[in-house]
Amino acid sequence: MDIFTVDFRKVICAVLAAVMLMGMIGPAAYADEPGVPPQLADDAPEGADQAGEQTSPSAAEGDPDAALTPPATEEEMAGTEWEETLLQTGETLPGTEITAVPETEPEPEATPTAAPEETQAEAVSDGSDDPLYAKMEAPMAIAAIPNSFSAVTPRALKSGEALRKGIDVSAWQGGDINWSSVKAAGIDFAFIRVAYRGYKGGGLAVDSYYSQNLTGAKNAGLKVGAYFFSQAITPEEAREEARYLVNIVKNYAIDLPLVFDYEEVGNSDRRLKMNNLSRQYKVDICNAFCDEVEANGYKSMVYSNPLTINDHLDRNQIRRLWLAHFSAKSDYTGAYEYWQFGKGALSGVSGEVDLDYWFEPTGVVTPPLNEQVTTPTATPTPTPTPTPTPTPKIDTPPLESDPFTDVKADSWYAASVLWAYKEGIVGGVGNGAFAPNNTATRGQMATMIYRMQGSPAVSGAAPFTDLKEDYYKDAISWAASKKIVNGVSEISFNPNGSITREDLVSMLYRMSGSPAAAGSLSDFTDASSVHDYAQNAMIWAIDKGLIKGYSDKTIQPRTAATRAEVCTMLMRYSDLT
C-alpha cells in the first residue's frame, strides 16, 4: 500500500512538471513566427476563443482533462451545462447544430430602428434571440406566484359574463402537450405563441411547436387564440408582425383574438429599451398591429402588465386587454377581458404552464341566437303640439337603416347584416350591438339556416349527445335529418366550435342539393388547404359568387367565419334561390 502511494505521488510530480514545462515553451514556439498570434496557434485548446478565454461550460466534474466538446444536438444538450449557459446568456453556443436567427434584412448597428423587409416564409429560429430568453434573465420580483385556479380571486363578473379557465403556451412547454388531458383538466381555451421578433437583431421567427399546438388544442375542443411576442420599434414593424401572424394562422380555425405581446425584456442594450420610445409612440405601435389584424377579419388584443399599461401605454387607447398580473387578486382597476394570474402544474403539460381566466361576455363571443327577433316597426308620428320641436339626438341613426351601434352604414357588411336582421335570421347580442367580427359557431350556423328555411317542424332528435342548449337542438336535428350538416363524429356535433369558411360553404352546398361543380380553385394560392370533402362545395361557391376570396389571392377555407361573413354569404345565397 505504501509503495503504491509513493509511486502515485511521483506520477503526480512528473505530470505537474510536464504541464509547467509545456506552459513555458508552448507560446514561445510561436513568439517569433510572423503573422501567427499566439492565441490562434494550431495547438490552441478546444473551447478557447481568440482571447484565450474558455467560452464553454466547465469540463465534467472529476475529469479535468475531459474534452470541452459541445453536444451535437439539442436533445444531447438537454440537462447539461451547455443548456444552462444558453439560458443564461441567450447566445448560440459554438459547435452545436443550432443556427442563428435568420434576418430578413441586415440591420446596421447605428440604425436600430430600420424595419426589416416583410418575409413571406416562416423563419425558423434557434431561440437565441427569443425575447422569452431575456424575460427569463430578469424575471419579475414576485413574492408568491399563484400556482392554481383555486389560489386566486378573479374580479367580479359583469352582467352576461361567464368565467372560463385557460392556459397560454409556447415552445417552452415542449412539443408533447397532451391536449386531451388538458381539456379533461377543465381547461376551456388556450392562447398559442405562433411567432416572435428577436429582441436583439429584430428578425422574425416562428415558435417551434405552434402548428401542433394550434391543431392539438382545437381538436381537443378548446377555443384557440394566437399571440405574437413583439419587439417592434416602429408602427410599420408592428404591421409587419401582424401580417406575418395572419399569414400563418389563416389556415387554422381561430376562435379568440390575435394578441400583441408587447414587453420590454432583458438589459438596456435590447432593441426596445435602447430606443427610448415615447409613451404615445408605443401606443401607436400597439394600435398599428391591432388595426392590421382587424383589417384581415380577426379580433385583436394587447397583452400587458399593470406597470407597462400605467407608465408606458394608455389603457384608454387600447381596445381589448389581456392583463398579465401575477397576483392572488389583481388590484388593477382598468377594464380587461383576460387575466394571466400565475403558473403551475397541469395534467397534460410537462413542467409549469401559464394560467389564465377569461371573463367571457357570453352575449358577445357566443351570441344567444335564441334571443327573440322582432321586425323593426316605424315609430308613430307624435301629435303636433305648440311646443318647440325637440333637438334630434346626435349619432343615433334611424332603426331601419342601422339597428346596431357597431355596424356602420359604410361598412362592407352593413347591407347583409341589416337584411339578415330584418329576415329574422339573426338577432343582436345586447346593448344595441351585433359583434360583426366575432366568430360564429356550428350551432349558430345551423340555427341561421333553419330560420332561413322558415323554422320547419322537427320530428325526432339528432343522434348527437353534446347538444346541451335548447336554442339549437331543433335546428341541428332538422339540418341533420336533411343531410345538410354532419357531426364531427357519430355522436358529437361540437355545436360550440367555430364554423370554418369551408364548413359554412359545405352546409349551403348540401342545402342546394349538392349540384355539379364546374371550375377549379387554381386561382387561389391556398387551394391545397381545402379539405377533400369541401372541394366541390368551394368550387361551387366560387362559381356562384358566394365567396370571392381575399386581396392576397387566398380563400382561407379553415379560418373561422365571422358573423358578418355569415350574413353576407347567406344574403348572396338567398339571391340564388
Image (spheres, rainbow, N blue to C red):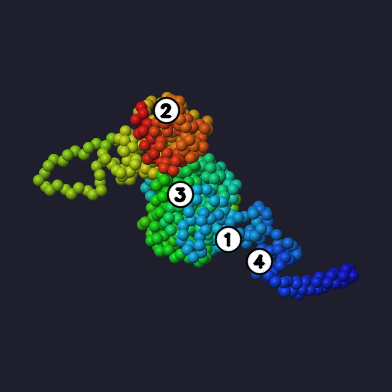
235 versus 467 height, above or below: below
Tell me the CA gap for discs 4 and 3: 41 Å
37 versus 342 height, above or below: below
Residue bearing the label numbered 4: 49
The quarter of the rendered structure image containing the C terminus is top left
Residue bearing the label numbered 1: 90
Q: Earlier in the sequence, mark 3 or mark 1?
A: 1
Q: Earlier in the sequence, mark 2 or mark 4?
A: 4
Residue bearing the label numbered 2: 511
Q: Which numbered tag is attached to residue 243?
A: 3
Task: Measuring from the top left, give residue 179's x and y in whole percent.
Answer: 56, 44
Q: Earlier in the sequence, mark 2 or mark 3?
A: 3
Q: Give the SS element for disc 1.
A: loop
The amino acid type, in three-letter code, at marker 1 is Gly
The amino acid type, in three-letter code, at marker 3 is Arg
Q: Give the SS element for disc 4.
A: loop
Give the mark toward the camera: 1 or 2: 1
Q: Which numbered tag is attached to residue 235?
A: none
Residue beneath the point at 60% across and 55% down: 99
Q: Residues within 10 Å of mark 1 (few under 14, many from 20)?
A: many
Q: In this rendering, does residue 153 appear at all? A: no
Q: In this rendering, does residue 458 appear at all? A: yes
Q: Residues within 10 Å of mark 3 (few under 14, many from 20)?
A: some
Q: Give the SS element for disc 2.
A: helix
Q: Give the SS element for disc 3.
A: helix
Q: Earlier in the sequence, mark 4 or mark 1?
A: 4
The amino acid type, in three-letter code, at marker 2 is Met
